[in-house]
Image (tube, rainbow, N blue to C red):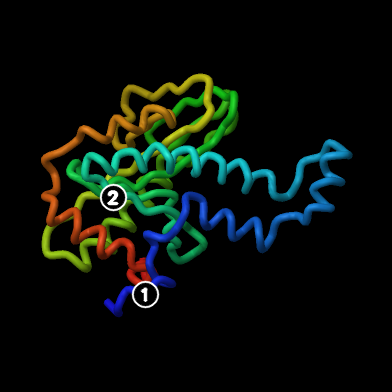
Amino acid sequence: MPPLTPSHDLALNRPGASLREKLDAEGPTILERAVDWLLRRPSEGDSYRKGLAGEVRVGAELQRLSRRGWRVLHSIELPRKVDVDHLLIGPGGVFCINTKRHLGKAVWVGDEMARINHGKPRPYGRKSKAEAHRVQSVLERYVDFPVRVEPVLVFVGVTRLDKAPTQLAVHVYRDREVSALGPLSGVLSPEQVDTLYAVARHRSVWLTA
């Protein structure tokens, strides 16, 4: 790997950094937002702002785990317009975390799909597992020990969260429950945590994910 410079150091990313960039580049201007508000119509940037609020909320919860020896990175950009919302590395392993904000909605999560208020299936579970696999493939190129990356879905602002009994492959939490990962231990040594964090924070390692 080339030397780590500030421009390549993902440890400097704030939660939701990718969404902030999209809002700056593609979001409506202040005037356009004001017109949308007056006309009571959805703004083109609404989905980005909602997603950003969810990532900031979950990022704050994850940051609290640092006192237990965990390290967290946010907004890791992968090829093909994909980004990892949060990557948690610590004594209990490596977790690839995808944040979903569905304010005031009821959510059901199955093996591959999720439903919001009994709506059409959304491939949250399938995509989360695929994303974790990509992350694992990258990390294992740079370390000399096996790495297992587990997928996590965190739902923000939901009124109800149910899982299918068969759904065991993806960890599913509400935002206030993500602290349950904190006590996990016995998977990685402190040295392995440091090694993986040093690799993962380097933007260039993800260019071929």
Q: CA distance from mark 1 to mark 2?
A: 19 Å
Residue type beneath disc 1: Thr
Q: Position of residue 166 (x, y in %)?
A: 31, 27
Q: In the image, 150: left or right of 114? A: left
Q: Is residue 148 above or below residue 68?
A: below
Sequence-first tag of 1 and 2: 1
Q: In the image, 53: left or right of 190? A: right
Q: Quadrant of residue 39?
A: top right
Q: Residue furthest bottom?
A: 2
- Name the foreground residue: 119 vs 29: 29
Q: In the image, 48: left or right of 186? A: right
Image quarter in which the C terminus is found:
bottom left
Q: Residue at x 51, y 51 (%)?
A: 16
Q: Residue at x 13, y 51 (%)?
A: 190
Say the numbered circle drawn on residue 71: 2
Q: Residue at x 12, y 64 (%)?
A: 144
Q: Which residue is mark 1?
A: 5
